[in-house]
Image (spheres, grey):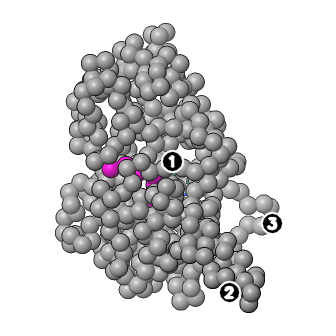
């Protein structure tokens, strides 16, 4: 962590809480959720920078066009399950610069493409086209930009590395093992605030991330992500909502939390001054429960409950495989061989067990059956220590 007055994982215990006010010891200190909100999305915020997320890290979207092609195949499976609706939405939630939605629309087969409508949902401003190059908004392959997901559409809502950027508060146990909210200054120095006490945050921790009564343990309160995910799922009239992210599950929460920063391809200490991304792994099991209204999903058949699977398993089910082409191809068609070899390398990266393949896919059907033949890995089979975002 970045705390100047703390150890590797620990805020100073001098705080009495609050957000600074006139107390010089706590001046400028706010909770991490508020600090990250301002640093990422406020004036001069990290995500408002012209270079966009891709200027600082690579997601699966940038790793290979095979990813968008697989998502396009998933959209076709959803289309089939929905009985080929007149308008089929693809909603790219947290779209960055719209790279995924644009590539998915282009990859659709001729019988689906004319019915498809793409939405790039992004709270940071979309890129401005150069004068004279304004795309034709009547073109089905051009997404509609919006800041909220469209309401009542039918299709696939896909959120790649969105939820980890929904800011959360951080708590840390004090010397007596009591959890306190962690406060932070814009330079990254931390102090302990008030005890979490009772209330919704305490209840969330108790249910999803219970902390032992030991000093120095940390947790991130995923409530804002649960709410964001539930709202995104609720925007679909029918279809499939998918959240892809680095995750942890209740059986194996990281004892010191996962809050971190990224800048120009490197993992850096999380400093909420707008100079770096601020991110934390996602409790996707909690989001799944929130997406079904907290219960197992009233009226939802058990086989259509949300599923949590690894990216490796689902991409393989969608035909992304890292097998090398036969050497004989090099003799008959060297160009095709080189192309196939490159694709195999990209597929291997997307499905690597200790890399992008270990990301979690939360798949939540809404008024449609879960696509037949898709994998279901119970959470205990998910990797205990999934990787961070790759530079
Ligand atoms: C890590 S980037 C991922 C970009 C892209 N999905 C990808 O995989 O390359 C997260 C994006 O989510 C956007 N975002 C965060 N909260 C959002 C919200 N509530 N609504 C829309 N976009 C949001 C951020 O501005 C950022 O562009």
Q: Position of residue 314 (x, y in %)?
A: 43, 70
Q: Which residue is mark 3?
A: 132
Q: Which residue is at the front of the view, 176 or 61?
A: 176
Could you tell whether 229 is left or right of 106 in the image? left
Q: What span is colored magenta in the figure?
A: 243-249
Mark linked to residue 328: 2
Give the residue at x 47% y 70%: 315
Q: CA distance from mark 1 to mark 2?
A: 38 Å
Element class at badge 1: loop
Give the residue at x 80% y 61%: 131
Quarter-of-image position of residue 344: bottom right
Question: Which callout, 1 or 2, points at the residue further toward the start of the chain?
Answer: 2
Question: Which callout, 1 or 3, points at the residue further toward the start of the chain?
Answer: 3
Element class at badge 3: loop
Give the residue at x 40% y 37%: 257
Q: CA distance from mark 3 to mark 2?
A: 48 Å
Position above or below: 253 against 300: above
How many numbered callouts?
A: 3
Element class at badge 2: helix
Q: Which residue is mark 1?
A: 388
Could you tell whether 145 is left or right of 232 in the image? right
């Amino acid at each position: 962590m970045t705390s100047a007055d703390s150890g590797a994982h620990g805020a100073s215990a001098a705080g009495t809480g609050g957000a600074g006010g006139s107390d010089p010891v706590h001046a400028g200190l706010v909770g991490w959720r508020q600090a990250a909100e301002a640093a990422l999305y406020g004036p001069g915020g990290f995500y408002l920078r012209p270079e966009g997320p891709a200027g600082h890290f690579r997601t699966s979207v940038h790793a290979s066009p095979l990813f968008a092609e697989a998502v396009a195949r998933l959209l076709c499976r959803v289309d089939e399950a929905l009985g080929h609706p007149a308008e089929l939405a693809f909603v790219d939630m947290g779209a960055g610069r719209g790279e995924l939605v644009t590539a998915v629309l282009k990859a659709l087969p001729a019988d689906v493409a004319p019915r498809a409508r793409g939405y790039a949902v992004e709270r940071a401003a979309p890129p401005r086209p150069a004068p004279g190059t304004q795309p034709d908004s009547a073109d089905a392959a051009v997404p509609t930009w919006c800041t909220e997901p469209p309401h009542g559409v039918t299709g696939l809502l896909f959120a790649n590395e969105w939820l980890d950027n929904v800011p959360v508060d951080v708590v840390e146990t004090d010397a007596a093992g009591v959890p306190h909210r962690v406060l932070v200054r814009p330079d990254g120095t931390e102090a302990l605030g008030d005890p979490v006490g009772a209330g919704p945050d305490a209840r969330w921790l108790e249910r999803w991330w219970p902390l032992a009564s030991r000093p120095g343990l940390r947790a991130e309160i995923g409530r804002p992500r649960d709410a964001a995910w539930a709202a995104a799922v609720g925007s679909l009239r029918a279809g499939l909502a998918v959240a892809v992210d680095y995750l942890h599950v209740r059986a194996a929460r990281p004892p010191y939390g996962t809050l971190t920063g990224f800048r120009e391809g490197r993992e850096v200490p999380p400093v909420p001054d707008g100079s770096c991304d601020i991110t934390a792994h996602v409790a996707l099991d909690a989001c799944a429960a929130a997406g079904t209204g907290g219960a197992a999903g009233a009226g939802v058949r058990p086989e259509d409950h949300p599923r949590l699977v690894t990216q490796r398993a689902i991409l393989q089910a969608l035909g992304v495989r890292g097998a090398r082409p036969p050497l004989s191809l090099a003799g008959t068609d060297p160009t095709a061989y080189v192309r196939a070899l490159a694709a195999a390398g990209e597929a291997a990266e997307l499905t690597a067990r200790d890399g992008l393949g270990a990301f979690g896919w939360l798949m939540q059907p809404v008024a449609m059956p879960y696509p037949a033949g898709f994998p279901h890995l119970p959470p205990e089979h998910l990797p205990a220590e999934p990787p961070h975002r790759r530079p």
